[in-house]
Image (cartoon, rainbow, N blue to C red):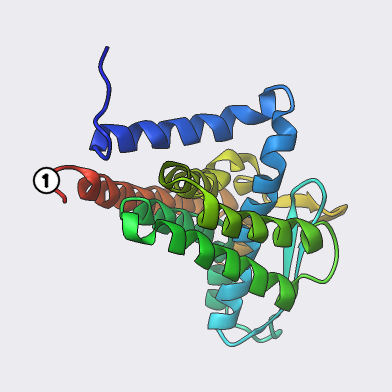
């Protein structure tokens, strides 16, 4: 029976496939919803922070991040009425694309042993600081700090193989969150916290000449390219030729 050599490209591919399968099928397994729930909250955090950070890049105030018990969320930013259409489009795009960027970086980090534990600690610090600054109510007030503590404990006490797998798991979770929510991406409006509001692609369509479904295809193409580059770099680095 074939067994991939430790640290080989085949082992790296195998780990990423296992992480992806767990993310996709865990909710259908007994108690899988409970297992995946903290990670669902974390994937929503990636998305909403993408909106918030992008708003801050344009100089706008990021006021609050809300995550609802069902895993949906909102990022509230003070965007002036005279804000350009371009800034509104980019802020809306920041939500779907930020998780792909962060997931790609985590997968890249998983190919370099020296930064495995440091990457988990850095993520925990980022989650903690954002919670203190922008989370004022709801499930995120206790789920995100719990996730931060878990990440730090894992980085401190976890075996190297477990730390590496968790980096890959969270990276795949962030990446797949956009593709698994394709119905939201291809919707003009969505029910968030009991309110019918414009979806991200709906906001982009409202401020451009393209329909929401065209923006959904554009975002998916950008995300696919981003992920493809990160996977290629990570796998090349983990192969004998890349070391």
Q: Answer above or below: position of 49 versus 174.
A: below
Find residue 34 and report its horizontal and vertical position in percent: 74, 36
Find residue 52 and report its horizontal and vertical position in percent: 63, 72
State left or right for residue 116 relative to residue 243: right
Q: Is residue 35 visible?
A: yes
Find residue 174 and report its horizontal and vertical position in percent: 53, 50
In the picture of the structure, the residue carrying the numbered disc 1 is 241
- Outermost residue, front direction? 157
Residue at 67% over, 39% down: 36
- Outermost residue, right direction? 194
Residue at 54% over, 45% down: 173
- Outermost residue, top direction? 1
Q: Is residue 50 visible?
A: no
Residue 78 quadrant: bottom right
57 and 136: which is toward the camera: 136
In which quadrant is the N terminus drawn? top left
20 and 219: which is toward the camera: 20
- Outermost residue, left direction? 241
Q: Answer above or below: position of 224 versus 48.
A: above
Q: Answer above or below: position of 184 versus 74.
A: above
State left or right for residue 12 relative to residue 21: left
Residue 6 quadrant: top left
Find residue 222 and report its horizontal and vertical position in percent: 40, 54
| Residue at disc 1, secondary structure | loop
Q: Mark 1, residues whose alpha carbon is within 10 Å: few (<14), some, or many (≥20)? A: few
Residue at 33% over, 60% down: 114
Residue at 62% over, 83% down: 83
């Amino acid at each position: 029976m074939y067994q991939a050599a430790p640290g080989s490209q085949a082992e790296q591919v195998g780990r990423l496939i296992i992480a992806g399968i767990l993310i996709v099928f865990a909710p259908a397994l007994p108690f899988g919803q409970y297992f995946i729930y903290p990670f669902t909250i974390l994937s929503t955090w990636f998305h909403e922070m993408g909106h918030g950070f992008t708003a801050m890049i344009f100089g706008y105030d990021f006021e609050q991040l809300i995550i609802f018990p069902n895993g949906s969320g909102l990022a509230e930013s003070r965007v002036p009425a005279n804000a350009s259409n371009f800034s509104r489009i980019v802020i809306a795009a920041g939500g779907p694309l930020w998780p792909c960027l962060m997931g790609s970086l985590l997968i890249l980090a998983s190919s370099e042993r020296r930064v495995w534990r440091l990457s988990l600690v850095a993520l925990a610090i980022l989650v903690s600081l954002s919670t203190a600054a922008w989370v004022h109510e709801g499930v995120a007030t206790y789920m995100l700090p719990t996730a931060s503590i878990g990440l730090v404990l894992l980085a401190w006490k976890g075996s190297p193989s477990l730390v590496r797998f968790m980096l890959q798991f969270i990276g795949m979770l962030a990446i797949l969150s956009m593709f698994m929510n394709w119905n939201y991406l291809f919707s003009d409006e969505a029910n968030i916290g009991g309110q019918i509001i414009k979806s991200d692609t709906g906001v982009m369509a409202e401020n451009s000449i393209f329909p929401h479904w065209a923006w959904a295809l554009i975002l998916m193409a950008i995300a696919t390219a981003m992920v493809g580059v990160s996977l290629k770099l990570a796998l090349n680095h983990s192969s004998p030729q890349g070391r």
